[in-house]
Image (cartoon, helix red, strand yellow):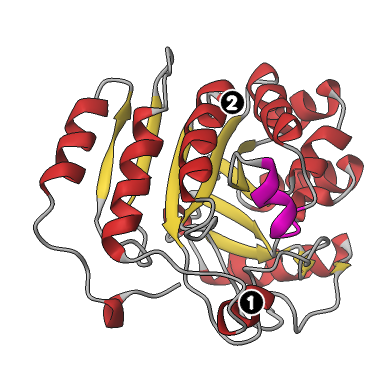
Amino acid sequence: MRYEGAIYRPPSEAQSLILQATIGCSHNNCTFCNSFRDKKFRIRSTSELEEDLTIARRYYKYVRRVYLADGNAFCIPSEWLLEILRIIKKLFPECERVSTHACVQDVLAKTSEELIALREMGMGIIYMGGESGNQEILDMVKKGITRAELIAAARKLRAAGMLSSVTFISGLGGRRLWREHAIDTGTVISEMEPDYASLLTLILEPGMPLFDDLHGGRFELLSPQEVLQETKLLIENINLEKDCVFRSNHASNYLALKGTLPRDKDSILNQLSSAKWLKPEEFRML
């Protein structure tokens, strides 16, 4: 396999074969992220990808899952994606599922028929960064989407029979907007009804514009206890009828939480209220 630069994948894709279908992120403007700022976005040719997969086939006897990197490979036109999926199916007939990240606009740009065709060819789950359900925060961090579009994208995936996994970021509203972030993120998850929802906790590093806002006094980070308070309010505002697997056990989180909502809602709230130990700052990482 040939890779350019640092490669990122969801924790749940730890055992997947990673195919770098795009270089970088087509949006690459979020103020809290510096993952792809050193990359110029481009889509790799299907011939390049077939060469990579052919090499991988020589080394791996069994590949259960394939993850398409980089930032949002779902932006690739559907006909190209279908060809990539055909190549994967030809070379790895044992592969059970292909997954990738998408910007909200990537999902909305595809027709329902295209989504169904992609799902039937093996695209099983789409990861999206929702970040917040509050529009002021989405605008502040230059996410480039609306709350309504986030809801529409999740519903469109569900209608096409494709799983959705959406990530939000604790502390993204800072001290000024923590309450709005918690309430609006809880209610947006309720309206989206994703199959999976997870929380990361904000970490700012040099190179991120929001890092400059922090050191310029324009943004205030939450303390660990304030993050827990925000998370509790967020969970209180999630009201779902269908099952949603919830996770807050990323390396960035102060407290590991997991369960299935709505069944485990009270248990998660009890864990937040009774937490005695939080991960020390030096052990948190992106």
Q: According to the image, label 1 marks what residue?
A: 213
The residue nearer to you, when weighing 105 against 168, is: 168
Circle 1 crowding by C-alpha within 10 Å: few under 14, some 14–19, many from 20: few
- Given residues 59 and 66, the one toward you in this image is 66
Distance from Cα at disc 1 to Cα at disc 2:
31 Å
Tell me which secondary structure the magenta stretch mostly adopts.
helix
Say which quarter of the image contains residue 31.
bottom right
Which stretch appears magenta? 135-143
Left-right relation of 105 to 200: right
Q: Position of residue 4 (x, y in %)?
A: 71, 82
Point out which mark residue 250 bears: none
Which amino acid, mark 2? Met
Residue 216 shown left or right of residue 76 in the figure? left
What is the quadrant of the C terminus in the image?
A: bottom left
CA neighbours of label 2 inside 10 A, class few (<14), some (14 to 19), many (20+): many
Which residue: 67% across, 28% down? 151
In percent of width and height, residue 127 lies at 60, 46
Q: Which residue lies under the disc numbered 2?
A: 192
Relative to 111, say whether 206 is above or below.
Answer: below
Q: Quadrant of the N terminus?
A: bottom right
